[in-house]
Image (cartoon, rainbow, N blue to C red):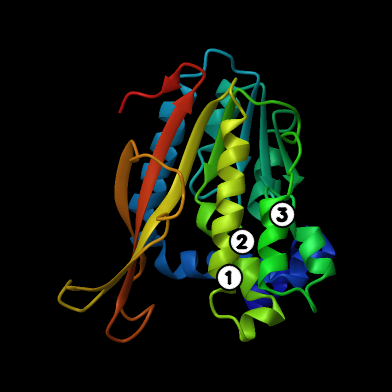
Amino acid sequence: MLREWIRTLRADCPRWARQLGLVYEHAAIAARHRRMHRHWAPHLARSREIVLAAAARCARTGRALVIGAGDCLDVPVSALAERFTEVVLADIVVSPEARALAREHRGRVRCVSWDATGALEKLAAVRATVVSAGARRLFEESDPGPPPGGEPDLVVSANCLSQLGLVPGHALPAAGVDEALPDRCGTAAAKRHLAWLAQRTGAVRVLLADTARLDLGPDGRELKRENLLARLPLRRPDHAWRWDLAPIPEYSADVARIHEVGAWIDGPAGRAAS
């Protein structure tokens, strides 16, 4: 707990990010990775492979943009820095790991605190009084603006789609009386993010995202499945795999939490070959 508390103090982010639970979530993910690094390794390696495959498709190598960079566990930052003139690591909470990579590749890698939804500062301002419809509308009508640093040649949405509105939604007092509010915020934010990505027509675009959440028993039997992308306008992913997110007893004494993950690669010429 002390390590996580220190990490929250060191977080580089706007003040409203703390009000919406984003700094706590950032520290919690880092802590879980320390405990589960062996179980997460195949998922992280697969994510990095997908990003590198997409980077190889780029005819232009001026700028790579990573959205949801976090601790850069799932992004091959050093390899991207060798290929692109500039790599922009964008997240609301800029991690110590991202800052260290920027120092290591000074002049080629830089960190930006950036809200990919364009809605969160406004949401934090009305956090105490906003109700379900108002919160959802903020995400639906938001505009993140142009990409930080300018239009990229490669843009990576790094395993953040399902969390963009979900985590802030849970931080709203209104969620205490409307259990569906976080999911509504999550869906609205995800749709807006997908529309924003689709506007980057000059870039090779990589989307890494959770597609389903599974609970498995000790014998591997599926106890529960939740489709995370059912209401989103997405085709079948180009690549898919499982992420051993929280095995027994990390999640509970008798249930393991598994995520199914999809990867989509699109570019200026349209859909990528699988």
Crowding near the residue tagged with mark 1, few <14, some 14–19, many ≥20 C-alpha atoms within 10 Å = many
Amino acid carrying mark 2 in the image = Gly
Give, as a three-letter code, the residue at label 3.
Ile
The circle on residue 223 is none
Residue found at the very far front of the displayed protein:
133
Question: Which residue is rendered at x = 53% and y = 52% of the image?
Answer: 161
Q: Is residue 7 visible?
A: no
- At x 44%, y 40%, the residue is 48
Circles 3 and 1 in contact, beta carbons < 8 Å: no
Give the numbered dot on residue 182: 1
Q: Amino acid at mark 1?
A: Pro
Q: CA distance from mark 2 to mark 3?
A: 13 Å
Q: Which residue is mark 2?
A: 165
Would residue 12 appear left or right of 201 to someone viewing this image?
right
On the image, the x and y values in percent for residue 102 come to 70, 40
Q: Earlier in the sequence, mark 2 or mark 1?
A: 2
Quadrant hosting residue 38: bottom left
| Residue 121 at x, y percent in the picture | 80, 59
- Front: mark 3 or 1: 1
Taking 154 as reference, is 40 left or right?
Answer: left
Q: Residue at x 66, y 53 (%)?
A: 140
